[in-house]
Amino acid sequence: MKLPLFLASRELRHDWQAAACFIAALVGVLAPLLIILALKNGAIDAMLGRLVEDPANRELIAIGTGRHDADFFKKLTARDDVLFVTPATRSINAQANAVRNRQARKLVRKVVLIPSAAGDPISTTANVAPGVATLSTRLADELEVAPGDTIEIRINRRLNNVVETATQDVVVAGIVPAENYGRSALFIAVQDMVAIERFRDDASVTAEDWAEPRAMPETFASFRLYTRSLADISALEKNLAAQGVNVRPRAQNVELLLSFQRNLNLLFVIIAALAVIGFWAAMASNLRGAVERQRTSLSLLHLLGLTESSRRLIPVTQSVILVLGGVFITLLFVLPSIVFINRFFTPEGFERIAWLGPQHLFGTFVLGLMTAITASMWAVLAIKEIKSDEVLRTS
């Protein structure tokens, strides 16, 4: 083993210009691939993961109004593909005329009201209850409130051409992160939503007693529904359609997003494979050409007693030295580049946009070693045809 290694290294040293060009070609192929892989591991996977895991993209929106009873909600809750479901009132009643922070003298008009309950994937900061709500970040900023503060909601109705206003104090239990919900909205209990609807629809309910506890209705006009994953949307949508319940996904391109997630790794593997195959072919032909240029030397070595296996190890050793050397030099360029990219190009909200783990570095060396060994096989087969007497015939 020592002699083939010595001969291979001496040959590379003698023809160092060709060896340097070969290594440069490898760096030119491998460095962009590793940078792309680092970006895929960082920014691309992070953005795709956010899209896939964003609960808003897993919402099924009810179309129109219906009569959904307790059995309907019980069956939905029992499904494995349902993450969260809660009854909702008609959309016409899902708005407060105003929400006010008396202490700061701030008022926001026409605030969206969203029914919520324990386990709400959007409002995860606190569980709502009658008289207790969570606010979107935008609404909290507009009202200048924080958890523990008290706000007032105002609900108007027109009765006999007279506008009546009902008010209720609500305790702020938490703030919904802006990335979960970007508009001004108030997440309140279903009981409060029902009370608002009753006040607007039932003339017997007064502005003084409208918020008092009452029996819940037997059916609800709508609902909020979230699946456990994007992959569950299609099946659940079809199941509800079979029941006569029309829904639509909030995310309009669910199948495209899922397809992109499935095929992202495959796409990178195909690109990398094409690059590796091209480099492998170039390397195999170069090693085979080197054997042809060295036929006389290899024949002389055989005549001097160098074994067949030792002769065959020469191109294999040269290939391994060149490839592993090229991989090492590539990493000397790539790793500082990743540090530079993360330091100067990482946007707010991202920890890093590019990274390579130990498994990726180890895999690169293993793939390089496999490429080196397999690419040298053509040269190894060519050496078998070089006889010891060939040097005598050519001299």
Image (cartoon, helix red, strand yellow):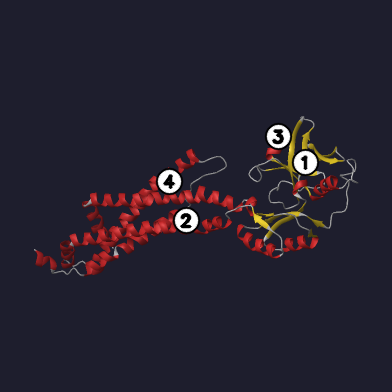
The N terminus lies in quadrant: bottom left
Q: Which mark is residue 359?
A: 2
Rendering quarter of residue 149: top right
Sequence-first tag of 3 and 2: 3
> What is the C-alpha distance between the residues marked 4 and 2?
14 Å
Give the residue type at disc 2: Gln
| Residue 54 on image: x %, y % | 62, 51
Q: Secondary structure at mark 4?
A: helix
Query: Which residue in the protein does label 3 denote?
Result: 142
Query: Which residue in the protein does label 1 denote?
Result: 96
Marks 3/1 in contact by CB < 8 Å: the verdict is no
Which residue is at 47% across, 59% downward?
266
| Residue 184 on image: x %, y % | 70, 40
Sequence-first tag of 1 and 2: 1
Query: Which residue in the protein does label 4 denote?
Result: 335
Whether residue 307 can be seen here:
no
Rendering quarter of residue 185: top right
Marks 4/1 in contact by CB < 8 Å: the verdict is no
| Above/below status of 40 relative to 160 | below
> What is the C-alpha distance between the residues marked 1 and 2?
54 Å
For label 1, count other residues whose C-alpha is less than 10 Å away and answer few (under 14), some (14-19) or many (20+).
some
Give the residue type at disc 1: Ala
Q: Nearer the viewer, mark 4 or mark 1?
A: 1
> What is the C-alpha distance between the residues marked 3 and 1?
15 Å
